[in-house]
Amino acid sequence: EADIYQTPRYLVIGTGKKITLECSQTMGHDKMYWYQQDPGMELHLIHYSYGVNSTEKGDLSSESTVSRIRTEHFPLTLESARPSHTSQYLCASSKGSRASGRNEKLFFGSGTQLSVL
Amino acid sequence: AQKITQTQPGMFVQEKEAVTLDCTYDTSDQSYGLFWYKQPSSGEMIFLIYQGSYDEQNATEGRYSLNFQKARKSANLVISASQLGDSAMYFCAMRERNAGGTSYGKLTFGQGTILTVHP
């Protein structure tokens, strides 16, 4: 059912490197989100977007940045990776402002497991 | 601010038996939505069930049902006839609305409950 894709699935990288986590969806959803999740823990919202050229910071402070130049694409960038950035990053999308109730459910990608050495 | 609490870090159930996963929430909104997601060890998030704050009946989706007690602010997930494939992490989540009453769409998640189904 979900047509939202994240790459890479796993990434091991050294401290100080710049990285970009890719997220794309083919459902035409206006809203997109990035969540961060440590192993066995809850998800924390770090970025969200309501449409092209719209981005907002989430509840959890993050050194990452995002962009939304196209509806289907919502990449996340870390300019200088650190070991504290090691985590799983989950991208999600949902329908636009006309959606309500059950239709506001989030569709998630498979996640990117990032390890910074 | 809204808050979701799942007080059971881990639960065990025998195959074919029913199990209830607890979720309580805190909100001052009159209109809100509650979601349950399943996260297997592979890491993806799978939508299970939704309950709206104005829904008069408890939601059901196959073997999943939601025991919604609005006055107690609880939205417990009931899984009937547990299967080995139900072993996973389960998250309760709530959808926020802004001051104007329109939905942000963002979900706030609880801490999760790890369910283990024994054969």
Image (cartoon, rainbow, N blue to C red):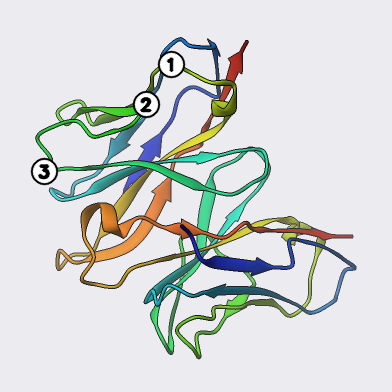
Q: In the drawing, does residue B51 fall left or right of residue A62? A: left
Residue B98 % position (x, y): 23, 64
> What residue is shown with label 3?
B54
What amino acid is found at the position of numbered circle 2 in the picture? Answer: Arg
Residue A91 % position (x, y): 55, 64
Q: How crowded is mark 3: few (under 14 residues within 10 Å), some or many (20 or more)?
A: few
Mark nearest the camera among 1 and 3 is 1
Which residue corresponds to the image point at 46% horizontal and 65% vertical from the top-left?
Answer: A58
The correct choice, above or below, for B61 with respect to A45 in the image is above
The correct choice, above or below, for A108 with respect to B18 in the image is below
Residue B55 tag number? none
Which residue corresponds to the image point at 33% horizontal and 68% vertical from the top-left?
Answer: A95
What amino acid is found at the position of numbered circle 1 in the picture? Answer: Ala
Residue B14 % position (x, y): 54, 8
Marks 3 and 2 share the same chain: yes
Judge by depth and name the residue closer to the eye, B13 or B10. Answer: B13
Q: Which chain carries label 3?
A: B
Mark 3 → mark 2, Cα distance in angstroms: 23 Å
Q: Residues within 10 Å of mark 2 (few under 14, many from 20)?
A: few
Q: What element carries label 1?
A: loop
Which residue corresponds to the image point at 62% horizontal and 56% vertical from the top-left?
Answer: A110
The reply to whether the C-beta atoms of the residues labelled 1 and 2 are less than 8 Å apart is yes
Q: Mark 2 lies on which chain?
A: B
Residue B81 tag number? 1
Which residue corresponds to the image point at 37% horizontal and 60% vertical from the top-left?
Answer: B106
> What residue is shown with label 2?
B63
